[in-house]
Image (cartoon, rainbow, N blue to C red):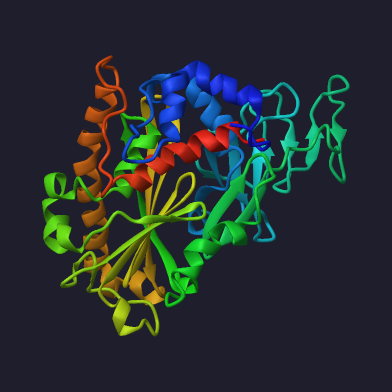
Amino acid sequence: MNDPKHDPAYVARVKSLIGEDGFDQTFAPIEEASGLPNAAYWSEDWLKLEQERVFRRSWVFAGAEAELPNPGDMKPIDIGGAPLIVLRDHDGSIRAFHNVCRHRGAKLVTEPCNHATLTCPYHAWNYALSGKLRVRPHFNGPNKPDMFKDGGGDKLDLMAVRIDTWNGCIFVNVAGDAEPLEDWLAPLVARTKNYDFSAIRWAGKLDFDVNANWKLVYENYMEGYHVFAVHPRLLKFAPMNVRWSGEWDQHVFYNDYVFPESEEGRGDGLPVYPDLPEEDAKRGLWFLCFPHFAAEVYPDQFTLLVSYPIAPDKTREELHVFVIGDEANSETYAKPRAALIQMWDDLNREDLGMLELLQQGRLSPAYDGGRLSPHWEGPTHDFGRRIVEKIISS
């Protein structure tokens, strides 16, 4: 651990929480390694490290642009433990701010809504959708408001959060120092050159409350080893003999398979990507752009699984479904579109019970991180290593 990119203070904090052995196991070869120790799934202090050092320092999916179709539409969201607001300004641009009044720190927005301005519920300080302070009622005494033509400056205007978009997807970087979004997504884009993502259109989302740690969601997502035991329909669609472990390409996990036949919900009944080559007509691909942007690509869809940690054993999960082209969202395709969303709902619910069992098992002092399959679980093990690396990196 003499790498100068590692912060000694955070190395020490990590070792104090998961132990020297747990730290060493994280960096061991898959044949010798175990998973992260139980503390990484139950410790409040460990989750605080993940929120601060992983989520705030990375690009994180904050929603679909289609969730904010009109000026004044706004959505509160917590990312990295920080309450944020994502909104559409009057000029049509998407903006993000810390969801806190600059006066006494009251939270401004508590649920999705539409307003022409932002008004604090405590003392009615009012902000434009650009984040600039407009008025402070009675601030200088009764009926003596402070009015601002061009905002109140750095001390009074809402604090902006770095934001960018990609084909209808909104991303924020709370710390503001992540690489350009285009570079972060480059490994995914490089492996999907045959797919015109400018054609994707948001069709809706599913929300889940998961009684398990957020990491278990992605550990389960990456490995296909459990499919034969948990997902009967998925197994029939893509048997174990078409599956492999996947691999990491820089900070992006990648996997794919070629399925024997299309079915409703996967490649059948909905429009497909324009000019998609025959070689991809029966291909499914899935990615995890570290830490949490999980994308599945089939001929007729672009589906996202994103999870937000709430507590060590509580996760808020969103599943966003995008179809291909405007026509796919028309009444003509209502039935296959509903079948697509229902398929994802059914599949995800099959996993929820397993995730809760995994979480509960990590209360046992007899569990030491397990023994991982070199054939299936190398990328899953590497996911844990990447979390530790992100926490301790300078």
**Quadrant of the rendered image containing residue 233:** bottom left
Write down the quadrant of residue 134 in the picture. Answer: top right
**Picture coordinates of residue 192 (x, y %)?**
44, 71
Residue located at (53% from left, 33% from top): 110
For residue 192, above or below residue 128:
below
Between 242 and 122, the residue placed more toward the observer is: 242
Please tell me which residue lies in front, 91 or 23.
Answer: 23
Number of marks drawn? 0
Q: Residue at x 31, y 40 (%)?
A: 31
Judging depth in this view, the residue of 311 and 99 nearest the camera is 311
Question: Can residue 111 be seen from the camera position used here?
Answer: no
Q: Which residue shows up at 37% across the image and 30% down it?
A: 213
Q: Nearer the viewer, residue 320 or 102?
A: 320
Left or right of residue 185, residue 348 in this image: left
Q: Residue at (22%, 74%) from the top-left corner? A: 269
Quadrant location of residue 175?
Answer: top right
**In the rendered view, does 222 fall on the left or right side of 75?**
left
Q: Is residue 146 left or right of residue 325?
A: right
Q: Is residue 184 visible?
A: yes
Q: Position of residue 164 (x, y in %)?
A: 62, 56
- Residue 318: horizontal and vertical position, in percent? 38, 45
Q: Quadrant of the C terminus?
A: top right
Residue 343 as seen in the image, left or right of residue 216: left
Q: Position of residue 301 (x, y in %)?
A: 34, 67
Which quadrant of the rendered structure holds the N terminus?
A: top right
